């Protein structure tokens, strides 16, 4: 199976109709971009559930200084892609030279002028982004089998999350070796009786 089947279940006491954000962190060295809100679960009432797929691989694309976006290419660890100018214009292609690290995917800017943005997608949604990659430079991406999840407000899928939001999200879930599982949210509640939100895995299949 090339994806993990996950099912979010709201068993919390939340009365604020809170949003739940799920994202990954790029652990490649020298990566300093802010994480992206990959999935945002909204209006999921108490005892409601929200099934979704978590692909094991990701896709990359690039956008140039003219606002053009390349197609998305499935990427595997150790591969490198390069943005070049051919007879048709700026295109992204698989490089014959692999990434420096076998655990990373690189997107190189081999244009003679103009910065590019390198984008990663999972399940068709933006997962990570490296902006302003200058000619001769590259972006590196590496993701572990781990997601981060937390309760937020006023965030949309595909948006960069500020450091204040990220600092509030302390739950990480290791999905290594799992084929399907429920992510159960508990806690919350109104007033001074409220408890912190907790996220735990149940009904784990390996």
Image: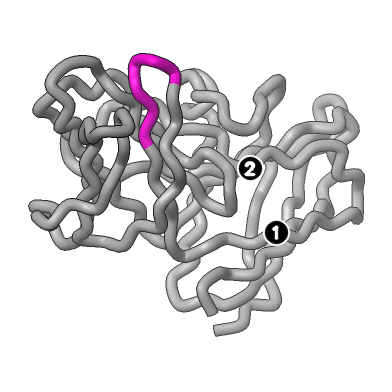
Residue 131: x and y in percent read 33, 22
Give the residues drawn in magenta, as a range.
62-67
Quadrant of res 50? bottom right
Q: Is residue 107 visible?
A: yes
Of 21 and 97, which appears nearest the observer?
Answer: 97
- Image position of 123 with respect to 32: above or below: below
Residue 81: x and y in percent read 24, 47
Does 161 sit left or right of 102 as displayed?
A: right
Q: Of marks 2 and 1, which one's residue comes earlier in the chain?
A: 2
Q: Determine which of the numbered discs, if any, sits on residue 39 in the image.
A: 2
| Secondary structure mostly seen in the magenta stretch | loop
Determine whether label 2 and label 1 are within 8 Å by CB.
Answer: yes
Would you call the spot at circle 2 few (<14 residues within 10 Å), some (14-19), or many (20 or more)? many
State the quadrant of the N terminus: bottom right
Quadrant of res 145? bottom left
Q: Residue at x 70, y 77 (%)?
A: 203
Q: Residue furthest front?
A: 87
Please, what secondary structure does the residue beneath circle 1 have? strand
Q: Find disc 1 in the rendering and name its residue.
A: 52
Please, what secondary structure does the residue beneath circle 2 have? strand
Does 202 sit left or right of 87 as displayed?
A: right
Membership of 201 in magenta stretch: no
């Amino acid at each position: 199976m090339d994806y993990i089947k996950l099912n979010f279940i709201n068993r919390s006491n939340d009365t604020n109709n809170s949003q739940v954000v799920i994202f990954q962190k790029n652990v490649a060295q020298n990566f300093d971009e802010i994480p992206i809100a990959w999935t945002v679960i909204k209006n999921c009432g108490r005892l409601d559930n929200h099934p979704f797929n978590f692909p094991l691989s990701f896709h990359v694309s690039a956008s140039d200084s003219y606002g053009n976006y390349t197609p998305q290419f499935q990427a595997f660890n150790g591969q490198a892609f390069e943005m070049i100018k051919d007879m048709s214009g700026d295109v992204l292609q698989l490089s014959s030279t692999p990434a420096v690290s076998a655990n990373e995917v690189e997107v190189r800017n081999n244009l003679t002028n103009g910065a590019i943005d390198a984008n990663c997608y999972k399940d068709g949604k933006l997962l990570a982004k490296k902006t302003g990659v200058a000619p001769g430079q590259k972006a590196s991406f590496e993701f572990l089998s781990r997601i981060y999840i937390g309760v937020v407000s006023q965030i949309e899928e595909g948006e960069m999350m500020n450091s204040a939001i990220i600092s509030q999200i302390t739950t990480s879930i290791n999905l290594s070796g799992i084929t399907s599982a429920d992510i159960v949210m508990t806690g919350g509640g109104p007033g001074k009786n409220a408890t912190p939100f907790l996220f735990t895995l149940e009904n784990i299949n390996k």
